[in-house]
Image: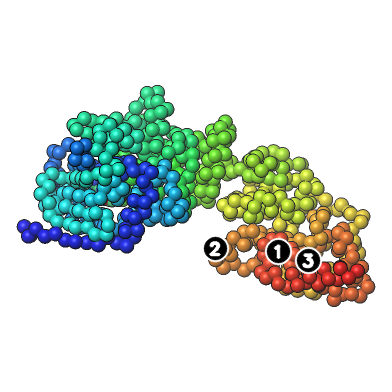
Amino acid sequence: MAEQTKQQYEFKAEMKQLLHLIINSLYTNPEVFLRELVSNSSDALNKVRFMQLTNENIHSKDAPLQIKIELDEKEQTFSIEDTGIGMTEQELVDRLGTIASSGTLEFIKQIQESKGKLDGNMIGQFGVGFYSAFMVTDEITVETRHASPDAVPVKWISDGQGTFSVEESEREERGTKISFKLKDDFKEFATKYRVESVIKKYSNFVDYPILIEDEEINKKGALWHKSKNDIKDEELTEFYKFISNDFNEPLDHLHLAMEGRMNFKALLFVPKQRKPNFFQNEEFKSIQLYSNRVFVQDDCKEILPEYLRFMEGLVDSEDLPLNVSREVTQYSPIMNKIKDVLVGKILGMIEYWAESEPENFKTFLKEFGPLFKSGINSDFANRDRLVNLLRFQTTKSGDDELVSLKQYVERMPDFQKEIYYLSGDSLRDLRNDPRLEYFKKKDVEVILLHDPVDSFVVPGLMQFEEKDLKSIEKSDIELGDADEENKDALSGDALTKLIGVFRDELGDKVEDVVASKRLVDSAATLTVGKEGMDSHMERMMKMMNQEIPASKRLFEINPAHPLIKNLAAMNEAGKTDRVKLFAQQLFEGSLLMQGQLESPTEFVNRMTNFMKMASED
Ligand code: ADP
């Protein structure tokens, strides 16, 4: 055996930062260290239990799988010991000396953003882990022995200030023991009563006995194996909080027990509130996978499609082949069948809310709507069900009211053959958009898309109940009034000539200039031909750096508008140069309305000149 040597190591730079932040930010919730240590032990036990199923050759083969906590009030000491998988020397140096989890980095970011004022309850949402123990102590000792038979026991000691040491240890048994002396301010964590109450709060469902002074203090057992009638609501809530680290109650849950062709149980929850950075961070652990009560893995991405990754909970199946590598398990046909059933049940629950629990449905859409709707573009098997769950604000809904496509179609007047939408950045801007004038006059409802996901999803639908979905920016919209004449509108030669001047002046910038049938109060607008993309979509694609040729627009002028009539008169009087300035200004004004004016300089200069002229009269 190698000579006993003690090696000194430096923490990585971020680690120093993390330790500093932990000590200064977590002091309102010092007890989280207990949950973190217990959960590390539970993970380590899960790993060794899994190993036992497939491997005979394990150190301390018969050691009971358990977590033992020892307290000494007089000495103010605390220790937690598990018979889990342990760590090799290399693992010890790597895992307790470098930042491992993305949760930790996220945690640092959040504390910095909140300037240290982090809500204690939020802490559970990040795996701050082992280091949180430095809140309550000045020095930690870790002794560990890995489960493989030839592993050397090692000891890690650190004061959390910048360095740690590693040396050989005397530890006989497999697993890990973490021990320290509590700072005076935290000596409460050497009393059984205090420790027990924290563990009951956070770790009651840990699947291994937690012993304090040889007394088992946690409830154990797989809640999901009980029959539905035997589970109390409080138990479900408590379990949800335990497995999700959420401090709210869940919005709803699903408890499934499938038997027969397929055997599995699932206990799944929908949170009331999404976690911080939910949409950006796809790493969050969500569904745990068990095989006949044995934990297999923590973050099973294959069991639910991406668009349902807001679900929390677990799936337990006896049918999953356990003795193969995880990869194979994930891609097994059984997995796919379970997935299909789960998706169906989850959609069923959401459909039920849509019908009978409108408040739940609203909360759900607010928290997870954008992700959920993206399923339309990925889950083709369930596309119709997902489309039926879309909800929108429209020109006829209040801001809080939600309209489905089905409702929209039901209230379409007879002459209306298509479903109309307009997309933009905010509901307020959309409600004031001049392009809606015509539809309001005709009493035709227009769907207002202000969620970027909707702006991508809805145009892709193409049709609903055999009706085309169409942006009102499209030029080819007919609402059965092609022949209606407005007696006051400009027509004939003067109009043709005016349009000619506009065409010459705007040249390539537009596809064409036409007399509009759809404008009511505004003088001009831009519309897009059959093949073109609507302006909001085009803008979003540009924002995502997509190379797309800008589609040319049709410039529509309103022959009934006084300004257009005045311009025709000016044109007749030979003031063509001035008419051209107006043409540019109207055109750029329309671009501006659609958020597509690249530089406002000329627009503003021209406007200043117009104001100068107007003020001289
Ligand atoms: P996290 O648990 O979020 O990964 P921690 O800082 O708590 O982060 O722990 C870092 C790593 O150290 C763990 O991922 C695990 O590999 C290892 N570890 C911590 N505690 C134990 C333990 N009791 N037994 C075995 N390994 C452990």
Residue at image location 74% in from the left, 69% down from the top: 604
Residue at image location 46% in from the left, 52% down from the top: 114
Measured as percent of width and height from the top left, residue 44 is found at: 24, 45
Mark linked to residue 544: 2
Measured as percent of width and height from the top left, residue 109 is found at: 42, 55
First reached walking from the N terminus: tag 3 or tag 2? 2
First reached walking from the N terminus: tag 1 or tag 2? 2
* Left-right relation of 550 to 17: right
Q: Is residue 579 visible?
A: no
Residue at image location 36% in from the left, 37% down from the top: 242
- In the image, 93 versus 374, the foreground residue is 93
Q: Classify residue 106 by image quadrant.
A: bottom left
Q: Which residue is mark 3?
A: 586
Mark 2: few, some, or many residues within 10 Å (few <14, many ≥20)? few
Image quadrant for the N terminus? bottom left
Q: Classify residue 123 by image quadrant.
A: top left
